[in-house]
Image: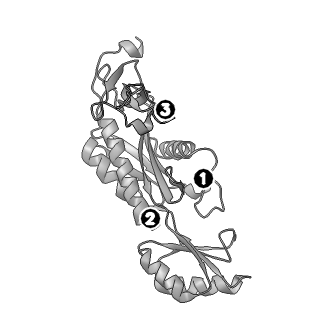
C-alpha cells in the first residue's frame, strides 16, 4: 500500500522516549515544553563532545549548514541511546535579515522519527548574539559586563581582538573576569582586551529562551496531524504569491495563500490568507516600480 493510500491512524508520542544529545543544558528549555504538549519523555544523551561539530569561539568551524549540524547531532544521540526518535538543537548568529545592522539569532530544533521516516523542524529567530568590546580599561569592562546581564550571561575574553586564537570562555563570576582581563591584557600586543558574549546555550539566557520558543514551534507542528494519514508534522510547506494591490488590483509578490502538506503522503491543502485581502501599494511593482 502506498503512503498516499494508507488509512488515517492518528499518531501519538505519549510515553515515547526521545533522545536529546546535548552537553550545554538544553534539556532544561526543551523537555518541559515537549513533555507537556506531547506526553513524551525527553532523555538527555551524554557521551559525545558536541563541540567537535563546531564552536562559537571559532576554534572548530561548523561544517555544512545549520540543519546539517542538527541532523548529525540527532543521529549521534539516536545511535548512542538506541532510540528510533532523536532530537537536536543548533543555533546560528549573524546580522538581522532586515537592516543587517543588529545581531540576530536563529534557533533550529530538529526532530527525527525513523519509524515514520520523517523530520520536523521547530524554528525561532529574533534579536540575539550580544555586543562586544575592545578596551584596555577595566572599568569599561565592568560597565559592559553589568549592562550585559553578567554573570548569568557568561563572557569570553581574548587578547587584542576577535581573531586571537587564545581565549578564556565560560567566565561566570567577577573574580574570574578580573583574572581573565589581567591575563588577556598581559598577552596583548596592543594592550587591549576583546570581550564578547559566550554563546553556548547554558551560558546565554537569551539564547536559552529562544531555544524554548523553538521547542514551542516544534510542539505545535508535532501536534498537527495530516488529515489524510494522521502523520505528525502537518504544516505549511509553501506560499503562493499574487495578493492583489489595494490600489490598482494587480497581483503582487505578497503571499495570497499558504500551502500545507504532509511529510509522508501526498495530501495538500491551499489556505487563502484571511489576515489580508489586499497588498499595500508600496509593495506593488506597478504602483511602485
The answer to whether residue 78 is left or right of residue 222 is right
Q: Nearer the viewer, residue 117 or 29?
A: 29
Q: CA distance from mark 3 to mark 2?
A: 46 Å
- Give the answer, above or below, for where 168 lies relative to 124: below
Residue 112 seen in the figure: no
Name the image quarter holding the N terminus: top left
Give how far across and how far down residue 282 sits, in percent: 43, 39
Q: Which residue is mark 3?
A: 285
Give how far across and how far down residue 266 sits, in percent: 40, 17
The answer to whether residue 172 is left or right of residue 6 is right
| Disc 2 secondary structure class | helix
Q: Nearer the viewer, mark 3 or mark 1?
A: 3
- Give the answer, above or below, for where 179 lies relative to 224: below
Q: Nearer the viewer, residue 102 or 5?
A: 102
Asked if disc 1 and disc 2 are in contact, CB closer than 8 Å, the reply is no
Residue 255 seen in the figure: yes
Q: CA distance from mark 1 to mark 2?
A: 17 Å
Q: Which residue is mark 1?
A: 53
Asked if disc 3 and disc 2 are in contact, CB closer than 8 Å, the reply is no
Q: Which residue is mark 2?
A: 202
Residue depicted at 42% across the width and 12% down the height: 2
The crowd level at tag 1 (other Cα within 10 Å; few <14, some 14-19, many 20+) is some
Q: What label sits on residue 83 in the rendered view?
A: none
> Which comes sooner in the sequence, label 1 or label 2?
1
Q: CA distance from mark 3 to mark 1?
A: 44 Å
Residue depicted at 47% across the width and 83% down the height: 143
Q: Nearer the viewer, residue 92 or 284?
A: 284
Q: Nearer the viewer, residue 48 or 108?
A: 108
Q: Nearer the viewer, mark 3 or mark 2?
A: 3
Amino acid at each position: 500500500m502506498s503512503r498516499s493510500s494508507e488509512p488515517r491512524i492518528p499518531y501519538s508520542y505519549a510515553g515515547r522516549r526521545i533522545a536529546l544529545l546535548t552537553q550545554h543544558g538544553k534539556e532544561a528549555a526543551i523537555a518541559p515544553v515537549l513533555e507537556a504538549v506531547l506526553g513524551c519523555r525527553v532523555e538527555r544523551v551524554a557521551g559525545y563532545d558536541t563541540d567537535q561539530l563546531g564552536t562559537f569561539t571559532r576554534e572548530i568551524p561548523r561544517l555544512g549548514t545549520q540543519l546539517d549540524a542538527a541532523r548529525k547531532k540527532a543521529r549521534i544521540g539516536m545511535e548512542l541511546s538506541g532510540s528510533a526518535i532523536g532530537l537536536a538543537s543548533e543555533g546560528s548568529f549573524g546580522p538581522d535579515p532586515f537592516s543587517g545592522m543588529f545581531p540576530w539569532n536563529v534557533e533550529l530544533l530538529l526532530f527525527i522519527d525513523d519509524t515514520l521516516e520523517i523530520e520536523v523542524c521547530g524554528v525561532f529567530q529574533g534579536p540575539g548574539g550580544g555586543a562586544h568590546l575592545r578596551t584596555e580599561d577595566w572599568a569599561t569592562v565592568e560597565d559592559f559586563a553589568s549592562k550585559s546581564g553578567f554573570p548569568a550571561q557568561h563572557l569570553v575574553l581574548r587578547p587584542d581582538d576577535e581573531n586571537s586564537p587564545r581565549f578564556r570562555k565560560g567566565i561566570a563570576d567577577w573574580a574570574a573576569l578580573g583574572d581573565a582581563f589581567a591575563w588577556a591584557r598581559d598577552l596583548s600586543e596592543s594592550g587591549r582586551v576583546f570581550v564578547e558574549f559566550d554563546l553556548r546555550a547554558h551560558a546565554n539566557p537569551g539564547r536559552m529562551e529562544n531555544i524554548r520558543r523553538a521547542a514551542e514551534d516544534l510542539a505545535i507542528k508535532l501536534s498537527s496531524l495530516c488529515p489524510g494519514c494522521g502523520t505528525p508534522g502537518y504544516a505549511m510547506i509553501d506560499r503562493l504569491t499574487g495578493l492583489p494591490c489595494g490600489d490598482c488590483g494587480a497581483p503582487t509578490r505578497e503571499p495570497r495563500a499558504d500551502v500545507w502538506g504532509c511529510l509522508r503522503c501526498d495530501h495538500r491543502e491551499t489556505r487563502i490568507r484571511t489576515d489580508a485581502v489586499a497588498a499595500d501599494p508600496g509593495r506593488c511593482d506597478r504602483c511602485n516600480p
